[in-house]
Amino acid sequence: MTTSGLVLTLAADEIVRQRCMDRLAAHDDLELGPAEGLRLPVVLTTADAEHSERVTRALRELPGVDHLDIVFVGLTDGDGSPPARADRAGAARTAPSVSPPQERTLP
């Protein structure tokens, strides 16, 4: 699964902007946040990265979207864990785990 955080800058023309927001609201893969002026936060959730890329390209071309910023992209397997990665030899391995920070004292 791919989850992307986007910020769309919408057209200044109110009619064009409203038509754009109506089309965005009808899209099943998008969750719209509250608009702040011409900027609209959007969460895009898709089954895979390729679908996410297609939707993102389509959003850039949508009448009423003047600019699109990608502020976050998260990739997970269906169970919510990071996806397996392939090492240089091509063998699948899991994403490295992160150890909790060690408590250190300064001299």
Image (spheres, helix red, strand yellow):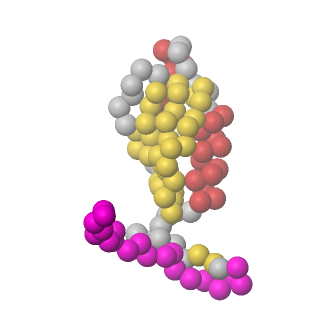
The residue under the point 47% across, 55% down is 3
Tell me residue 45's x, y (percent). Answer: 47, 54
Q: Residue furthest right?
A: 89
The residue under the point 46% across, 27% down is 39
Specify the principal SS of the magenta part.
loop
Tell me residue 105's x, y (percent). Answer: 28, 66
Span colored in magenta: 88-107
| Quarter where residue 100 is shown | bottom left
Quadrant assignment for the C terminus: bottom left
Tell me residue 102's x, y (percent). Answer: 32, 71
Residue 25 visible within the image: no
Q: Nearer the viewer, residue 52 or 102?
A: 102
Q: Is residue 59 left or right of residue 38?
A: right
Q: Nearer the viewer, residue 84 or 30?
A: 84
The residue under the point 52% across, 25% down is 10
Q: Nearer the viewer, residue 99 or 56?
A: 99
The answer to whether residue 7 is above or below residue 15 is below
Tell me residue 27's x, y (percent). Answer: 48, 43
Q: What count of labels does the image hold?
A: 0
The answer to whether residue 97 is above or below residue 64 is below
Q: Is residue 102 left or right of residue 98?
A: left
Residue 65 visible within the image: yes
> Is residue 17 located in the magenta-colored stretch of the structure?
no
The answer to whether residue 104 is above or below residue 34 is below
Q: Is residue 79 left or right of residue 72?
A: left
Q: Nearer the viewer, residue 25 or 97?
A: 97
The residue under the point 49% across, 76% down is 96
